[in-house]
Image: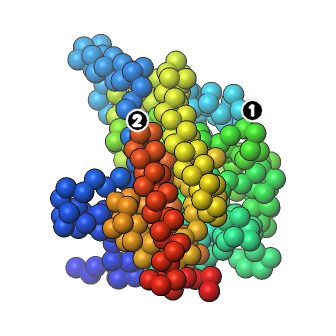
Amino acid sequence: MKLNKNFKNLGEDYLFAEVAKRVAAYKAEFPNSDVISLGIGDVTQPLSVKVSDACKDAGVEMSTKLGFRGYGPYDGYPFLKNAIVGYYKIRGIDINPDEVFVTDGAKDALGGFLDLFDADNTVMIPDPVYPAYVDANVMSGRKIIYVDGNRENGFLPMPPARGKADIIYICSPNNPTGAAYTAEQLKEWVRFALDNDAIILYDAAYEAFVEKRSGAARSIFEVTGARDCAVEFCSFSKMAGFTGVRCGWTVIPMASPLNRMWLRRQATKYNGTSYVVQRMAERALRSGYEETTKSVAVYKRNAEIITNKLDELGIEYLGGKNAPYVWLYCDIKSWDFFDYLLKKARIAVTPGSGFGRNGEGWIRMTSFNTTERTEEAMKRFDAFWKEYVEVKEKLFRPLSK
Ligand code: PLP
C-alpha cells in the first residue's frame, strides 16, 4: 500500500480546526471564561418553521406505502431541480433542469468535482480565499498559481495580463473578505477563461447576501459567455441554515462535457441527497422563501453592528454588506492578534493569514452569532481596541512600520 504523498504538502491542520483547537485550549485553561465566537462561519439561527414543517411532512410521507422512497436520482428529484431553475429565472437567468445537480453541499461538490480533471492542470486560485480549494488541489497534486487580492484591488483580483491557467476558482461574495465582483468585472474573467480554454469553478455560496443596490453579481451566468466556460456551485447552508442539514446544487451547462462526466461520477460515488432534505430545500425556495431568508436579515443586521463599531473606531475594513464576513486590518501578524484578542477580550475570530499569504495582517469576523452576542462582542472589542492601539508598538511589531 502506498499513501498519497501529496498529503505531506498540506498544512498540519485545516484552518478552522486550528482555530477550534486554540479556543478549546483557552477554555480548558480558563473554564469559566465566556468566549464569544465571531470565528467559524457557521449559522446560528434555527431553521424556519416552514422548512421544518416540510421535514415533518416528508417524514410522514415516507412512513406510508405510497409515499415511501428508496434511492433517489443521482442528480436530485425533479421537484427540487425545477425549484432551483425557478430561483434563477426570477433573476432573469435561464437554465434547464438537466443542468442542475442537487448535492450534499458546496464543499462536497467542489472537492468531488476535481475527479473530472487530470492532475496535469494548472489551477488559479485567488489569495486570500476559502482554504478548501487549495487543500483539495494539493491533495491531488496539481500545480497552483495565485492571483493576489490586496488593499489596492479591494481584494478583487482581476485576470493577470500574462499567465496561463486551466482551472480558475472564483469565490464571490468572497470568503473571507466579503468583497463581491460586479458582472462587468466577471466579464473579464469569462474572457480570460475563454482565451485560455479554461474552466471557471464559481462558488456562489453567499449569493443570497448580495444587495441589489451594490451592483454585485449573484451568479456567473449573469455574464454572456459564461455558459461556455463556467460551472456554478451553490448552497442552502448560509441562505437557509442548512449547514447541519446539508444540501446544495451545482449548475453545469449541457454543452459542456463536464455535465455528462459529473452525472457519471455521481452515479459511481454518490447515492443522492436524502428525499426529506430535498423537500426541505424545495420549501426553502418556494413557499418558505420569505420566512427562511429572514435569518439572512439577522446576519446582515449583525454585520452592521460590527461595521458601525469599526467605523467609530476608525478601523480599516471591507465586507459586511454582500457577505456575512467583515475583513479588518489589525496591522500585526494575524495569529498574534487572534491570540491577544482571545486572551484580552475573549473573542474568537479567524486569522486572515489562514486564508492565504495576502491575508497576513488581517482578521475575519463573522456576523453569524446572535445579535445579543454580537453586540456584547463589539462592546468588548471597543474597550480592547482602545487599549490595543496604545500597546501595539510595545508588544508587537506592526507590519506598517
Ligand atoms: N464555499 C464557501 C466559500 C464557503 O465559505 C463554505 C462554507 O463556509 C462552503 C463553500 C461550504 O458550503 P456547504 O456547507 O454547502 O458545504
**Figure quadrant of residue 230:** bottom right
Query: What amino acid is labelled 1 in the image?
Result: Gly
Quadrant of residue 359 within the rendered picture: bottom right
- As helix, strand or loop, the secondary structure at mark 1 comes to loop
Residue nearer the viewer, 379 or 21: 379
Q: Position of residue 155 (x, y in %)?
A: 67, 65
Residue depicted at 52% across the width and 18% down the height: 287
Q: Residue at x 68, y 40 (%)?
A: 211
Nearest-to-viewer mark from 1 and 2: 2
Distance CA(mark 1)–CA(mark 2): 30 Å
Name the mark on residue 45. 2
Q: Quick one: 106 or 231, which is closer to the camera? A: 106
Residue 101 pos. (x, y %): 51, 41
Is residue 267 something one can see in this rendering?
no
| Residue 199: x %, y % from top left | 65, 61
Residue identifier under label 1: 92
Residue flagged by tag 2: what amino acid is it?
Gln
Residue 355 rendering spot, x and y as whole percentages: 50, 69
What kind of element bears circle 2? Answer: loop
Image quarter where the N terminus lies is bottom left
Q: Is residue 89 left or right of residue 310?
A: right
Disc 1, ligand 1: is the CB inside 8 Å?
no
Instruction: Residue 293: tell me if it is visible.
Output: yes
Picture quarter containing residue 138?
bottom left
Question: Is the CB–ligand 1 distance for label 2 below 8 Å?
Answer: no
- The residue at 37%/53% (across/down) is 37
